[in-house]
Amino acid sequence: MANFDNWIANRTLNFDSSGIRKMFDMAANLEDPINLSIGQPDFDVPQPIKDEYIRALNEGKNGYALTQGIPQLREKLQAEVDQNFGHDDRDVFVCSGTSGGLMLSVLSLINPGDEVIYFDPFFVMYPAIIELTGGVSVKVSAYPDFKLDMQKLEDAITDKTKMIILNSPSNPSGVCFSDEEIKGVAELAAKHGICLVSDEIYSKFVYDRPYVSAAAYNPDCIVIDGFSKTYAMTGHRVGYVHGPKKIIETMLKVQQFTFVCSPHPAQWAGAVALDTDITPYVDQYRIKRDRLLEGLSGNYEIVKPGGAFYAFPKLPEGVSGQSFVAKAIENNLMVIPGNIFSDYDSHFRISYAVSDEKLEQGIEVLNRIA
Ligand code: PMP
């Protein structure tokens, strides 16, 4: 047998997914757990979207799609982007999920040694894709209130800073940055000539005020969004990117030789998804968010999440994420320790994208073990 350690590229060595696997291993024997660990909606894909997927399959939409996406979807997205931003230089293409778009953005823009700034807590994929492209992660803490401190951000910028990744509403905190914070980051990136990548996958799940994209304040901003969360299509792998033409052309060139295209029938489903009103789902999640905050008040410190379907409560004093999660699992409850999403082990993530019944059970257990 070969020495497989010698086969494995160095770029894969500095990140791992063992934390989350450990959690799922511990929970493997639970029967019908109260699972508040899942990062996807609990509603099923709306029927018209499924019907269109099946129609596309049956009518032979099974071959390669154009790498930039089928015109029926791409043109709808382009019209929406033109209407929202009115930028002269803003093109859209369809990618394999938001993850695909994020990967293409770093592959297209990051040279080895380039620094990429993002806020801690962060979506788990960011450190990994930066590491894979030889970039250097520079994390700016958003603790304890998950607000963006412009001074800390400015202090983190060096002559090696190439990119800032912004994610609002945020995974794991659910926090939406204020318009002022978004404007501040957008203008700071423009002032320093830094690429701003805005991960807007939760843009449709906002509960207290209208969504504002960083691209509203920075015409060069690269926006990555997708259908996974909005229409519960996480397994379909449809996302989209919009930004300056020259950058989009480069990302498309890389997509052509890597992902090739987003799955063809799923793109037809995506075109129908854009006509689907998801307000009832968003309204339900707002109610669940409010119920969770009310149910845990008094026992946990939680920054009010304005979007997505997560809350990120502080751990009880002196308790590690690992031991808290072990205690939760003993009580048939699955939540995720915060250090999966952070350099700090001070919080845990709850997903409230579950039935009301499971949510009530989760609240009961969390209060019992607080
Ligand atoms: N960005 C964030 C912040 C996410 O939470 C997720 C999914 N958990 C993604 C990107 C990736 O989503 P997808 O690739 O399914 O579109």
Image: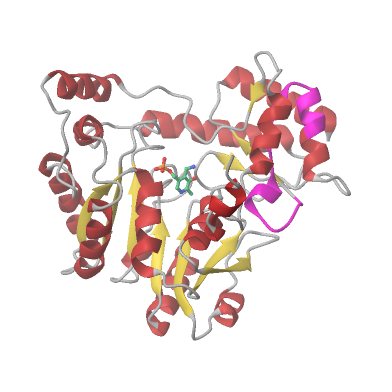
Q: In this view, does 133 lie to the left or right of 6?
A: left
**Residue 323: horizontal and vertical position, in percent?**
83, 38
Write down which quadrant ligand 1 falls in: top left
**Quadrant location of the N terminus in the rendered image:** top right
Q: Where is residue 138 in the image (x, y as percent from the top left)?
A: 58, 70
Q: Point out the residue furthest to the front here.
A: 1
Q: Can you give x and y, in whole percent of width and height, for residue 51 in the image?
A: 22, 19
Q: In which quarter of the image is the C terminus?
A: top right
Give the residue at x 42% y 70%: 183
Q: Which residue is drawn at 44% across and 32% down?
A: 283
Q: Eyeballing the image, is 268 above or below 112?
A: above
The answer to whether any part of residue 349 appears in the image is: no
Which range of residues does the magenta coloring cover?
A: 326-346
Residue 233 occupies which quadrant of the picture? Answer: top left
Q: Does the magenta stretch include residue 341?
A: yes
Magenta-span inclusion, residue 364: no
Extreme residue in the bottom direction: 159
Say whether residue 243 is left or right of residue 187: left
Which colour style is shown? secondary structure
